[in-house]
Amino acid sequence: MSILAQNADTAASDTDAAHDDVADISTAEAHAGLMLTALGLDVSDPGLIATPGRMVRALREMTTPPQFTPTDFEVTAEPGQLVLVRDIRFVSVCEHHVLPFVGVAHVGYVPRYRILGLSKVARVVHHYARRLQVQERLTRQVADWMSGQLDAAGVGVLISAEHTCMTLRGVGAAGSSTKTSALRGLLLDDVAARAEFMSLATGPA
Ligand SMILES: Nc1nc2c(ncn2[C@@H]2O[C@H](COP(=O)(O)OP(=O)(O)OP(=O)(O)O)[C@@H](O)[C@H]2O)c(=O)[nH]1
Ligand SMILES: [Zn+2]
């Protein structure tokens, strides 16, 4: 078993590189203070004086994708063997309301000749979650990354999440959850492989 890819060229990235360059923290803090003031809140109150700064730091933390270097290995794969990492907890931020949505992702794939370090499966989820998102795109981006990185015979991603913009405000649908899936290759086309993925992802842990 040999490491095939472990260098910065293969690190997960997309448009994230621009993130640090464009952030202007002091301007963001000033605007956060102005927004709270415009909402009728007294930011000179001792309890609120540091709040604009905290708001900005918290929002930045939740919208800054963690980078990582994928580690994948050459294998003689068992034909049709499913690898599944399930119950990966994540926190993301709804791009409509800038409120958190939180849930779990189940990520499976059928290797062709390369497997991914297991921790990297969770890192992929966190990479695409920690930004302004919609659940459908998060699901698709994780599936596309797995497909592209591993040239897998099949990829399946299931996500179940609570959107606080609809459970804690607005319609107030407390207890609701949203499920999304993205299936590629064998896990889309082969009925038995798809059933195995669904049953291992959603059955008893
Ligand atoms: N499809 C999809 N919709 C989402 C997601 N996150 C939030 N939304 C929805 O985005 C929509 C935004 O709709 P708007 O009508 O502009 O927002 P709003 O006036 O605050 O609507 P309410 O939430 O119904 O009060 C809402 O229906 C949200 O539930 C997501 O990940 N996927
Ligand atoms: Zn929302």
Image (cartoon, helix red, strand yellow):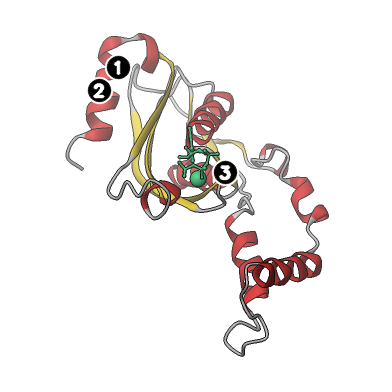
Which part of the image, by quadrant, shows the C terminus? top left
Asked if the residue at tag 2 contacts the one at tag 3, i.e. Cβ–Cβ closer than 8 Å, the answer is no
Q: Percent x, y for residue 100?
A: 48, 53
**Is the CB of the residue bearing disc 1 within 8 angstroms of ligand 1?**
no
Q: Quadrant of residue 192?
A: top left
The span from disc 3 to disc 2 (Cα, nearest Å) is 35 Å
Q: Residue at x 55, y 49 (%)?
A: 97
Q: Give the residue at the far left of this rendering.
A: 204
Residue drawn at (58%, 44%) of the image:
95
Q: In front: 140, or 96?
A: 96
Give the distance between the C-alpha atoms of the residues marked 1 and 3, in whole angstroms: 36 Å
Q: Which residue is mark 2?
A: 196
Q: Residues within 10 Å of mark 2 (few under 14, many from 20)?
A: few
Query: Toward the viewer: 107 or 130?
Result: 130
Q: Are marks 1 and 3 in contact (CB under 8 Å)?
A: no
Residue appearing at x 51%, y 49% in the figure? 92
For label 2, being within 8 Å of ligand 1 is answered no
**Up-down: is 31 above or below 101?**
below
Instruction: State the CA–CA distance, disc 1 to disc 2.
Output: 5 Å
Q: Cβ–Cβ below 8 Å for labels 1 and 2?
A: yes
| Badge 1 or badge 3: first in the primary sequence | 3
SS of the residue under disc 2? helix
Local crowd size for mark 1, using a 10 Å CA cut-off: few (<14), some (14–19), many (≥20): some
Which mark sits nearer the N-terminus, 3 or 2? 3
Placement of 139 over or under 89, stated as above or below? above
For the residue labelled by badge 1, is the local secondary structure a helix, a strand or a loop? helix
Asked whether, in this view, residue 60 is left or right of residue 191, the answer is right
Which disc is residue 96 wearing? 3
Q: Which residue does the numbered mark 1 point to in the structure image?
A: 193
Residue 87 in the image, given as x and y percentages of width and height = 33, 45
Instruction: Identify which amino acid the numbered label 3 is placed on.
Output: His
Q: Can residue 156 be spotted in the picture?
A: no
